Amino acid sequence: MKIFANENLFEPIIDYLRSRGNDVLSIRNIGLSGISDDEVYEKACKESLVIITMDKDFTRIFRFPPERCGGIVVAKIYRRTVDETFAIFRKHFQSINEEDIKGNLVIITPEGVRIRRSTR
């Protein structure tokens, strides 16, 4: 999967995604820190990338329709240490597959995973 990791995503999560064989572009690593949510979304749409972020603004499907890009995964895991956040993300990310993500909005919370499928 081709993933665009937003700058608020913790490095252990990015490393984990790469270890699973994904092609991950990290906003921090490619010198785009500070770009707006709209710029993140437009780049993902142009390159058919899956956005993975901890920014709940990306759950606004009318502003950021996931079917226009490769899909959007929002990790709504807040007020925890990096290690706790990573453990929760890894546990739940393992339960979803590429088809669950493609063109859809996937929300990962400490309680589990919700998938809002597009009507493409």
Image: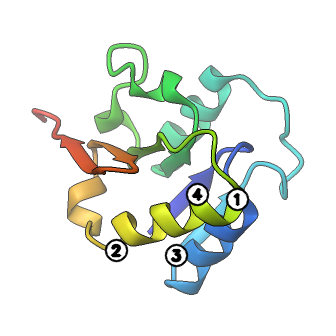
Marks 1 and 2 sit apart, C-alpha to C-alpha, by 18 Å
| Rendered image quadrant of residue 69 | top left
Examine the rendered structure and indicate whether residue 22 appears above or below residue 96.
Answer: below
Q: Which residue is mark 3?
A: 22
Earlier sequence position, callout 2 versus callout 4 = 4
Marks 3 and 1 sit apart, C-alpha to C-alpha, by 21 Å
Examine the rendered structure and indicate whether residue 38 appears above or below residue 9.
Answer: above
Q: Percent x, y for residue 83?
A: 66, 66
Secondary element at image label 3:
loop
Marks 2 and 3 sit apart, C-alpha to C-alpha, by 13 Å
Q: Are marks 1 and 2 in contact (CB under 8 Å)?
A: no
Q: Residue at x 51, y 44 (%)?
A: 77
Q: Are marks 4 and 1 in contact (CB under 8 Å)?
A: yes
Earlier sequence position, callout 3 versus callout 1 = 3
The amino acid sitting under disc 1 is Val
Examine the rendered structure and indicate whether residue 15 appears above or below residue 61.
Answer: below
Give the quadrant of the C terminus: top left
Q: Residue furthest left?
A: 119
Label annotation for residue 94: 2
Instruction: Give left or right: position of 80 versus 20.
Output: right
Q: Nearer the viewer, mark 2 or mark 3?
A: 2
Q: Which residue is mark 4?
A: 85
Marks 4 and 3 sit apart, C-alpha to C-alpha, by 20 Å
Q: Are marks 3 and 1 in contact (CB under 8 Å)?
A: no
